[in-house]
Amino acid sequence: MATMDYSPTQSLLETPKRLRLTPEVAIYRTTSAYTNYPSPLLVPHGHPPQPITTNIIKTWTGPKGFGARHQYDDAPFSFWNSVVEDFRLPTSEEEEAWLSSRYPNSRITFRWPTLIIETNMPPKPLPLTVAGVAAKFVPPPEVENGVNPGPGMDNLPIKITNDYMNMKSSNDPLPFRLTRWKRPTSEQQRAIVDVISNICNPHYVHVLFPYIIVELYEDGRCYGAGSLPRTIGGCSAVYHHQKTSIFEGMTVHGVPRLIQPSANVQDTSDYLQAYNVLSPGVRVSSAHITNIGQSATVAAGTTTGILLRSNHGQQRLTVAHHGFLRSDDIYHPTEAGTHIGVIDERFEHLDVALAKLNPSINYDNSTYFESKRPRRLLRGAEIELGACFSVDGMSSGMVSLRAVGITMEVPPRPARTTEIQWRDWNLFDGFGQIDTILRGGICGAAIVEDDVDDGGVAGFFHQGNGEWAWSPCLDELIDRSWSVV
């Protein structure tokens, strides 16, 4: 096994940082010992109403993607073999001499690319990786009626709800094998969608190694037992044919109940009043009056993205399209606050709207609370599986994400259409508070690289489902010559 150079934690001096003026949001993850990941900021005590210049800890060492180590990962070995680019199980010595000692009375499940550690004593501080592998710490499963439900994660974390797979045949419809733990190329994605569309009617195709998960349209079509291949591109194929997403059941036992807020806490602080400038991660709201003059029942609150510039010099702010469906007017921090701009272009399938800010409004990308400064937009092909990101929403504070796969959405095809179109999304595994209450408020927030200092933006938070999160790829914005200011 190849070893990884592990250097001590270092500190980097960054641009001025701002703390959230609503501390309940900034410390939200600390309400559970299982999501209490340390802040990357080293800040003085107090809550100053002005920018602070501070050290930001270098929280990651090692390679980008799989095998990277979080700052509190001090295992003397790695479960990632960089030579063969695959995971490995621990040796008996590693398991007995180190794992059992570091995490006593715990049950560890190796579900690559993640470790699930069931324990009543999560470590302090909480690491995002153990031995170079993403780790989730969860409480042991509850015993119900005297029956222990077993490991926190089943060996197969996907609920198979039908008998569509042909278990008697190993025929693979793809003429090539996908490289495990590597993002499929656009040509490979095209081949996957074409092959699957020839044998069934897919709505979503998720490449989530070691699986390819096909969510089928509820179109009345029936599939017989054993009628679909069990492997596609060398991956185990799973088919889901229900109205609810398959990801509803793909959670670690206990995680959905780790944080149960009694109220929906949001950062409604007025950053214009405090700083005379806005930045990524603040709250914005739609209007109570719609574009056609009617009164809206609810004014939607979401999170600001980043300021972009076109090749013609125009500057526009990104916001969540679905947060402003009936109104183009944008307010901060609530609908009763300051009118800051008007949407003049929408990319509905990206869930991105571009807003022209009022001349009096200053917006600065250089501060993004606890996340790194966004510096450039990333194409889908640039996002490595295993890479670590963070998103800082007005209802969640900072949440860590890891790119683990891709989702290809296949829109309904008109009759006699030969070419199959699809939209590719990034699929992330979340480490923290992406629950039902919070995920609406995070929408629109920029997802920025965390394990490198490049400031790459993978997308804007679009939807979450328990532990999982998605964002459409940004290739179209880049092709339209938009870039980060």
Image (cartoon, helix red, strand yellow):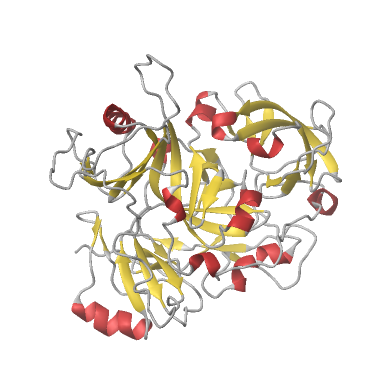
Please state which of residues 45 and 215 is positioned toward the viewer in this rendering. 215
Q: Is residue 408 left or right of residue 109?
A: right
Picture quadrant where residue 152 is located: bottom left
Residue 265 location (% of width, % of height): 71, 61
Q: Is residue 466 above or below residue 150?
A: above
Residue 402 is at least partly visible in this image: no
Residue 437, image x, y percentages: 63, 57
Q: Is residue 244 above or below residue 324?
A: below
Residue at 82% in and 44% down: 335
What is the quadrant of the N terminus in the image? bottom left
State the residue at coordinates (68%, 40%): 323
Q: Residue at x 19, y 79 (%)?
A: 92
Q: Is residue 482 left or right of residue 140?
A: right
**Number of marks drawn:** 0
Depth check: give the residue in front, 45 or 350: 350
Return the x and y of residue 24 as percentages of the image width and height: 71, 66
Q: Judge from the rendering whether residue 385 lies leftward or rightward of residue 467; answer left or right.
A: left
